Image: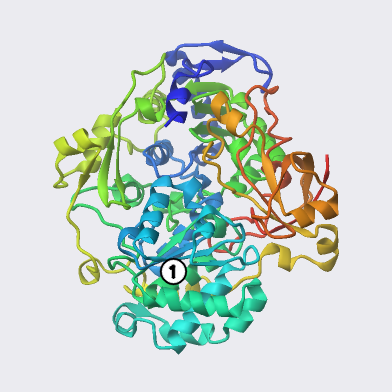
Amino acid sequence: MRALPEWTYHPDRLTHPLRRVGERGSGQWERISWDQALDEIADKMAAIRERYGAPALVGAVSGAAFSRGPVMALLMRSIGSPNWMINQDLCGGCRAVSDRLTGLSMTNGEDIDNAACILVVGRNPMAADPVQWLAIKRAKARGASLIVIDPFRTSAADIADLWLQPLPGTDAAIAMAMMRQLIAKGRHDAAFVQQWCTGFDALAERVAGYTPERAAKLTGVAAADIVKAADLYAAGPSVFVSGHGIDAASNGVQTFRAFHCLVAISGNLDRPGGNRRAKRPAGYTTYMDLLHDPRFRLPAEIEQQTIGAAQYPLWAGPAGWQTACHNKSVLDAILDSTPYPVRGMYVSGVNIAVMYPDTRRTLAALKALDFLCVAAHTMTPTAAVADIVLPKTTTLEEEEVDISQTGPCVTYTAPASKRIGEVRCDIEIAAGIMSRMRARGALTAELLPWPDQASFNRFLLGEAKIDREAMRRDGFAEFSYELRDFAANGFKTPSGKIELYSNTLAGLGLDPLPDHVPPLFERATKLVSADFPLVLQTGQREKTYHHSRFREQAWARKVSPDPTIRIHPETAGRLGLADDSWVIVETEAGAAPCRLRAEITDRTAPDIVTTGIGWWRPEADGPEFDVLDINVNAALTYAGPMDPMSGSVDTRALPCRLRPA
């Protein structure tokens, strides 16, 4: 509640367009008008388009969870480039790819209020989603069972009926063993599987080898606890609540496939107290609908040029989840022109210099561009190396329409504040760029026809039968929906059913069945394991910050002044590390080390160390703002191995070592 107002009214808020006047990253800027900024952006982008082709221009946002995602995608498509980057390979991308492959369409549809059993895997709801956390506590109070699978003892683990503490990255083995238990005891939903699933026999054969005893050896979790988890979940109705702890890894899609297949065979899909499928009122267009709508797409031969589509077609390009690029491959294209040169980039509302692994290489790529434009709220490490910086609206100044699957309902955000200075929202910025590109004959198509957010929102609402007055008054509008309408809406898979055995993966020569894939630290050589004997988990949530946001706010820095790394007392004692002391973190990937402050706690297991993400200091010297010193991404690599389905790189379960700073 405090972060958004202070973000909006902070004295360091960007309120006017800026042009770089010194060397890139020197911090020397001059204020310019919007007309000057848009003309210069169009001049630079048109010149790059003319010399190298439209795909040499790339957009970057966080993803399509907000309107800026499809706006960026349609802007780049209008220019003729299929290339736009999203952060989801480091966030919820593995979950989304698995969800699509399996055909569930259930993300964010957790019906906790009606569940008899809640299975929380790799998620800390207390910090990640306070509303969800309250729902879990309500469910516990009325007698629901809570199972938590997490290497770290979260607040949810504290109140769980059963806490399983696996070795990082081994969660899939638990899901495989739970499926085996359900099938062996005849506690799966045979009628549902018979009617709506395909590949059950192959799945049953695959999981047969995952006895509780084998899973115990793979995960470090007692076999009896795995059996108990399966029994509690089988009693149902049960809801699966997942988090980023099992995402953003080279085995991420397979891990999610295991849990998604568990949801399917247990019959907990789209039932009260289970995982509800995505719902929408008839006539409403979602952001994902828009991205895949043929009316707003480029010709197939252009979309196939999307960077990363050849290697990761389930992620990038025409068949991809959000049709976006593969981020690491874009950085390669900037630095070595593979598969072709990328020379210009427009970044909006995302701090990629902080959030991408291998920070030095990311910064080197940004600095190597011929032209970089960044729309931001404050001078971030990404904005600091730009040629043009544009001032963006914050959430308090914007109007937004979306669907919340938690409701499910249509949500409406009205501007709660007058705009500060000359800030503009994403669609207004995009419309301005398109106008200038059009005047220069540098548009391929007109795929962003809305001049402002209000007209865009009217398009999304379409002919949907919702009470618009109530939506604006209350901030949401409920709509009627039907559970288990499988016959009417089907499943978006090649077979038209839930695919326990994925025909898509089989066609790509990938494993069509879920499986346990050993995490990176287990695949390391004995020499590496000896030199890097600890296991690093990243992504630890803090309620104070959201990724790299709000670092400039004094109250947040008072609560959480430094990045911390959680270390078990036994591990800390062996390494001579004191509580609250600074430590050096190194990974076996060979990236440069970073510094983090030790937090000695038994909430993590011995030799498992856990830290957060997104750290930088706005008050430090630019353009890096300490991002090379106190940000764990400076110590990570973006080079692989990568998930063969999503292209995600390992950001957890990493071999590492610590030493006093």
User: In the picture, residue 653 is in which quadrant?
Assistant: bottom right
Identity of the residue drawn at 38% across and 41% down:
70
Identity of the residue drawn at 78% across and 57% down:
570
In the image, residue 479 above or below residue 553:
below
Q: Quadrant of the C terminus?
A: top right
* Residue 661 in the figure: left or right of residue 96: right
151, 370: nearer the viewer: 151
Q: The residue tagged with tag 1: helix, strand or loop? A: helix
In the image, residue 143 above or below residue 565:
below
Residue pointed to by mark 1: 260
Residue 622: give x, y in percent of width and height. 68, 23
Q: Quadrant of the N terminus?
A: top left
User: In the picture, residue 4 is in which quadrant?
Assistant: top left
* Residue 102 in the figure: left or right of residue 405: right
Question: Which residue type does callout 1 highlight?
Answer: His
* Residue 228 in the figure: left or right of residue 352: left
In the image, residue 280 above or below residue 488:
above
248, 333: nearer the viewer: 248
629, 97: nearer the viewer: 629
Residue 532: give x, y in percent of width and height. 81, 57
Identity of the residue drawn at 49% across and 74% down:
229
Residue 301: give x, y in percent of width and height. 44, 53
Colouring chosen for the image of the structure: rainbow
Residue 86 is at least partly visible in this image: yes
* Residue 459 in the figure: left or right of residue 632: left
Residue 430 is at least partly visible in this image: no
In the image, residue 439 above or below residue 657:
above
